[in-house]
């Protein structure tokens, strides 16, 4: 009886996983077409192989489900486990064309970049990036763009028909705002917002690219790719110099808009796009984000000024750019990794904290999230109020997120739990880096970058780093992006399975 | 068919004008943030 | 006794450094040296050699020329007349022209918002680039064919299974 129940569990999970993988196969058609357009025949073959392998996986999974699997009820655990499994298999399949292209040292490196894309981290192990074909570049940026919205969100949009449990899948990807009663429509709204911004952003960057001297065709692809990486707060760029490649204040200035807009909550975009503009200025996340960005920038700016490396306007160009890039979890860089070592310790710490804080909840960003920081701040205020007031007084605290919300214990518990898990992950990653022989500052910086899905690098992430560390980074990016719970549910499910046998 | 209906529904939620104003508001917010950043760096370099 | 070998090592390191600096201006400097000990070269005339990659970006009378020496890519700010000599730009399908640049190195360039760059005085082509051809192996086609057949088989299997019982 118990075993039968377990078999049903497995069927539901596999059914949904297969659907998501099918979505991945469909998606690979885009880089395939790009490669064909630019006559990169070998790369086109690589993508064809990837598509076929994805289809085979999805079909093989389907063999293990009964024809009526879609009728089975999806529970929360099923949703979480299916998402975890889909991400795991999705990363391996996405890495296939990467590996076949020959731009990676090993399959592990290719999987690292695939995970880095999906989690919108932006750390890279790709080699000889300046010679990478259009097809591969399209795939890199598409992965990161899709990863920002969520793999599940994509699958929901196209592949599911009226499934009641869809929201459970959607929430597994750390997106807990339900914009519309139906998860499928919520997913569509998320895509709608992203595509609107994609059109605007690509157009603006395309024109700017031509102003700064790129040819129209190249400018279009640079614009499209940079926008995809900016909006999803990913941090990939088509050239090895990242954003410094463009040597343009204007280009950087425009990027500010899209990385910040990308780090906003989709529920906020949704509300603002409905014409409720006041929400933007009242939202707890916006207020929290504005405060932390400015406070941290004051620290970074003072420290950089004191150390004297950026005497004038460079302070803004380099200091503010990297602070915002780190705070939104993007990871665009306009200096070389090794140049971070010359930043003063205080500026370094300011940037590190910004990376851990991250953008808004239910956005494309990683990190603690502004919502949780805001809630924790309100909690502190409430506790202080409680202390100075008479014991019998009833103290309430409210915060504004889409509507006025009374601060309750459950908000506090959820916020603190996730923040503590992030800090624990950060500590473990720092320890691992230090154990691999990197200096403390470098270890901490890279750990914060991996944990918060940021992608700024100080040089630890390189093809020559130990394989074990690469594997750990893959895991940390994954748990950081899914906000722990989905991965924990996945692990618990496996453990439970083993115990039953 | 299903696609069309949902597309229409999405458009009804967001009118073109509101999308335009919404994007402007958000970008305006970011402009404020960037402006503050510029102000801070200007003040810091002057001090 | 304990200080002996250590002192010698320090002495040698100094010596090497002098030799290194003395020769730095004759031989091209690697990008790694430029990035890691940038302040040492700040404002100095250096030689840098590598392949032109990506895009040439015209800005008035100058152009940005990204040059990769295999380890890193550094942006070179060169007069348009110099940049015009470049024919092949490195990408997936082309090996770019190999050039040698002599110019002033800036660790944190005041003219360009703090970027690390080289302001070229001279730019010479050492080796012309060329088209790169990627041979298509027959085995890859066969592999794709087999995978395709396998996928089709699984699809049909699923198709009939779904039809069958109900």
Image (cartoon, coloured by chain):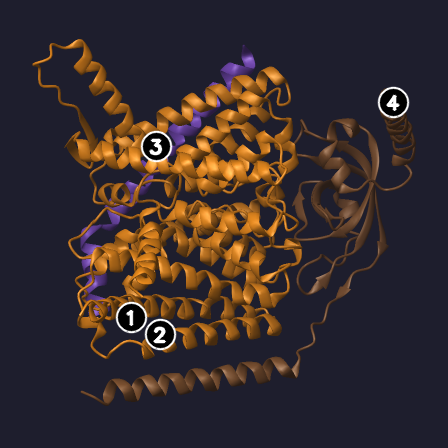
Chain colours: A orange, B purple, C brown
User: SS at mark 3?
Assistant: helix
Distance from label 2 to label 3 (Cα)? Answer: 47 Å
User: SS at mark 4?
Assistant: helix
Q: Whole-percent x and y of residue A422? A: 39, 37
Distance from label 3 to label 1 (Cα)? Answer: 43 Å
Q: Nearer the viewer, residue B31 or A494?
A: A494
User: SS at mark 1?
Assistant: helix
CB atoms at circles 2 and 4 under 8 Å apart? no
Q: Give the number of the mark in front: 4 or 3.
A: 4
Q: Which residue is mark 1?
A: A15
* Mark 1 closeness class: few <14, some 14–19, many ≥20 residues within 10 Å: many
User: SS at mark 2?
Assistant: helix
Q: Whole-percent x and y of residue B26? A: 33, 37
Dot 3 falls on which chain? Answer: B
Q: Which residue is mark 3?
A: B29
Q: Give the number of the mark in front: 2 or 4.
A: 4
Distance from label 1 to label 4 (Cα)? Answer: 69 Å
CB atoms at circles 1 and 4 under 8 Å apart? no
Which part of the image, by quadrant, shows the C terminus of chain A? Answer: bottom left
Q: Give the number of the mark in front: 2 or 3.
A: 2
Q: Is residue C53 left or right of residue A244?
A: right
* Mark 4 closeness class: few <14, some 14–19, many ≥20 residues within 10 Å: few
Question: Residue A61, which numbered label?
Answer: 2
Distance from label 4 to label 3 (Cα)? Answer: 60 Å
Q: Which residue is mark 4?
A: C7
Dot 1 falls on which chain? Answer: A
């Amino acid at each position: 009886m118990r075993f039968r129940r377990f078999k049903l569990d497995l069927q539901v999970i596999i059914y949904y996983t297969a659907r998501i993988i099918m979505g991945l196969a469909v998606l690979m058609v885009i880089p395939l077409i790009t490669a064909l357009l630019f006559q990169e025949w070998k790369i086109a073959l690589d993508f064809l192989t990837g598509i076929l392998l994805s289809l085979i996986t999805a079909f093989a999974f389907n063999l293990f489900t009964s024809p009526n699997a879609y009728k089975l009820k999806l529970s929360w655990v099923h949703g979480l486990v299916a998402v975890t499994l889909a991400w795991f298999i999705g990363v391996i399949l996405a890495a296939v064309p990467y590996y076949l292209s020959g731009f990676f040292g090993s399959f592990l490196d290719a999987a690292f970049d695939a995970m880095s894309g999906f989690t919108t981290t932006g750390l890279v192990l790709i080699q000889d990036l300046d010679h990478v074909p259009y097809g591969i570049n399209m795939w890199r940026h598409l992965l990161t763009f899709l990863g920002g919205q969520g793999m599940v969100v994509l699958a929901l949009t196209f592949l599911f028909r009226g499934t009641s449990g869809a929201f459970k899948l959607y929430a597994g990807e750390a997106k807990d705002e339900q914009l519309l009663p139906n998860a499928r429509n919520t997913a569509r709204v998320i895509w709608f917002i992203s595509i609107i911004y994609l059109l605007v952003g690509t157009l603006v960057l395309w024109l700017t690219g031509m102003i700064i001297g790129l040819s129209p065709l190249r400018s279009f692809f640079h614009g499209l790719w940079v926008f995809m990486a900016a909006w999803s707060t990913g941090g990939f760029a088509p050239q090895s110099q990242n954003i410094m490649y463009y040597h343009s204040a204007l280009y950087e200035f425009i990027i500010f808009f899209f990385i910040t807009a990308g780090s906003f909550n989709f529920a906020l975009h949704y509300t603002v796009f409905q014409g409720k503009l006041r929400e933007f200025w009242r939202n707890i996340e916006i207020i929290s984000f504005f405060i932390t960005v400015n406070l941290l920038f004051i620290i970074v700016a003072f420290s950089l000024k004191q150390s004297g490396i950026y005497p004038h306007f460079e302070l803004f160009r380099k200091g503010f750019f990297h602070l915002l890039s780190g705070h939104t979890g993007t990871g665009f860089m306009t200096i070389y990794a090794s140049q971070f070592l010359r930043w003063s310790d205080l500026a370094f710490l300011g940037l590190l904290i910004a990376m851990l804080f991250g953008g808004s909840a239910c956005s494309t960003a990683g990190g603690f999230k502004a919502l949780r920081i805001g809630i924790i701040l309100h909690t502190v205020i409430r506790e202080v109020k409680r202390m100075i007031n008479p014991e019998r007084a009833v103290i309430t605290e409210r915060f504004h997120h889409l509507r006025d919300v009374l601060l309750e214990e459950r908000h506090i518990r959820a916020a603190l739990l996730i923040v503590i898990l992030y800090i624990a992950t950060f500590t473990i990653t720092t320890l691992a880096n230090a154990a691999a022989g990197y200096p403390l500052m470098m270890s901490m910086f890279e750990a914060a970058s991996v944990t918060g899905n940021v992608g700024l690098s100080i040089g630890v992430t390189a093809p020559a780093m130990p394989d074990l560390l690469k594997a750990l980074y893959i895991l940390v990016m994954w748990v950081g992006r899914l906000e722990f719970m989905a991965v924990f549910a996945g692990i618990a499910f496996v453990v439970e399975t083993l115990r039953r046998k | 068919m299903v696609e069309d209906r949902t597309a229409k529904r999405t458009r009804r939620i967001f009118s073109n004008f509101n999308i335009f104003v919404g994007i402007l508001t958000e970008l305006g917010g970011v402009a404020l943030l960037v402006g503050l950043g510029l102000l801070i760096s200007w003040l810091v370099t002057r001090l | 006794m304990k200080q002996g070998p250590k002192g010698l090592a320090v002495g040698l390191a100094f010596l090497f450094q002098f030799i290194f600096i003395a020769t730095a201006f004759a031989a091209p400097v690697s990008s790694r040296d430029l990035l890691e000990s940038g302040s040492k070269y700040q404002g100095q005339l250096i030689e840098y050699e590598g392949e032109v990659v990506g895009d040439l970006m015209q800005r008035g009378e100058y152009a940005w020329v990204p040059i990769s020496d295999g380890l890193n890519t550094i942006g070179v700010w060169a007069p348009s007349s110099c940049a015009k000599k470049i024919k092949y730009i490195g990408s997936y399908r082309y090996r770019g022209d190999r050039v040698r640049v002599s110019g002033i190195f800036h660790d944190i360039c005041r003219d360009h918002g703090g970027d690390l760059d080289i302001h070229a005085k001279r730019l010479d082509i050492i080796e012309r680039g060329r088209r790169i051809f990627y041979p298509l192996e027959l085995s890859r086609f066969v592999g794709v064919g087999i995978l395709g057949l396998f996928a089709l088989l699984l699809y049909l299997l699923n198709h009939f299974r779904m039809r069958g019982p109900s």
